[in-house]
Image (cartoon, helix red, strand yellow):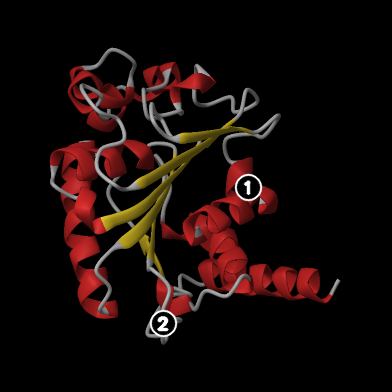
């Protein structure tokens, strides 16, 4: 009960910080754990990860271990991946770590995967956790094809063909995904699993619901701690 109370208070605090445009990860000492870089979805921002940050801190992470990469979701996912590469270099320089763990959601899967597979990021990524990642595209992207990011996210795109050619889980990075038939945005929902990853089927969770699903977020944290 005490642990649950602590977790709920931490979540409320993180949500309040996000509401005022503040980062709960700013200028805090690290706990010595591998830094975590969160990568948001289409139309999202760094504030999407307030609940995840609270769950991680309740399980022993310092706010100085947690970093949320924010990017322009209308641009090419390859461009966003190049920005992620620069961001990871900054995190490594700031923390003194040699690797990061990456947690992504939805279109953040494409950004993360392009960084790892096409931009030489794999040696710098210890774990990759993809929550409802659009790893093989989604037909829902048909509603926003005015954006190049959505064109790339549509099944059968040249971007996806290039991204997913060959090994989907390269190197000694540990990979895991969480996906659900109740997602409603990743269509088909089986787009998320990666060949060679630990793929976890969640019986029923919505696409945005994953961002505040404590059980899933705890499972992700435990995976990163493995």
Front residue of 91 and 169: 169
- Marks counted in the figure total 2
Mark 2 → mark 1, Cα distance in angstroms: 24 Å
Judged left or right of residue 113, residue 11 is: right
Judged left or right of residue 29, residue 158 is: left
Q: Say few, some or many: other residues with alpha carbon within 10 Å of mark 1 (under 14 / 14 to 19 / 20 or more).
A: some
**Residue placed at 41% from the left, 87% from the top?**
29
Above or below: residue 49 compared with residue 149: below
**Residue placed at 33% from the left, 19% from the top?**
154
Q: Say few, some or many: other residues with alpha carbon within 10 Å of mark 2 (under 14 / 14 to 19 / 20 or more).
A: some
Label 2, on which residue? 30
Q: Earlier in the sequence, mark 2 or mark 1?
A: 2
Circle 2 sits in a helix, a strand or a loop, which is it? loop
- Specify the farthest residue to the right: 1
Residue 137: image location, x then y, percent: 37, 23
Above or below: residue 159 compared with residue 26: above
Judged left or right of residue 148, residue 202 is: right
Give the quadrant of the N terminus.
bottom right
Above or below: residue 64 compared with residue 69: below
Residue 111: image location, x then y, percent: 28, 42
**Residue placed at 46% from the left, 70% from the top?**
21
Residue 82: image location, x then y, percent: 15, 49
Residue 161 circle label: none
Examine the image and state in which quarter residue 181 appears: top right
Label 1, on which residue? 216
Front residue of 214 and 21: 214
Circle 1 sits in a helix, a strand or a loop, which is it? helix
């Amino acid at each position: 009960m005490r642990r649950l109370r602590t977790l709920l208070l931490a979540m409320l605090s993180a949500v309040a910080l996000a509401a005022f445009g503040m980062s709960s990860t700013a200028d805090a000492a690290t706990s010595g754990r591998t830094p975590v870089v969160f990568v948001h979805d289409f139309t999202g921002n760094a504030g999407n990860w307030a609940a995840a940050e609270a769950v991680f801190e309740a399980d022993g992470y310092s706010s100085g271990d947690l970093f949320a990469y924010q990017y322009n979701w209308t641009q090419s996912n390859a461009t966003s991946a190049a920005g992620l590469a620069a961001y990871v270099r900054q995190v490594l320089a700031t923390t003194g770590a040699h690797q990061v763990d990456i947690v992504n959601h939805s279109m953040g899967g494409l950004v993360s995967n392009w960084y790892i597979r096409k931009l030489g990021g794999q040696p710098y990524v210890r774990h990759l956790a993809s929550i409802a990642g659009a790893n093989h595209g989604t037909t829902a992207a048909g509603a926003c094809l005015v954006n190049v990011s959505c064109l790339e996210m549509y099944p059968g795109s040249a971007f996806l063909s290039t991204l997913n050619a060959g090994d989907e889980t390269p190197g000694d990075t540990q990979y895991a995904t969480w996906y659900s038939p109740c997602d409603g945005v990743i269509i088909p929902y089986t787009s998320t699993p990666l060949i060679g990853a630990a793929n976890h089927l969640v019986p029923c969770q919505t696409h945005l619901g994953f961002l505040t699903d404590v059980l899933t977020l705890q499972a992700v944290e435990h995976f990163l701690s493995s």
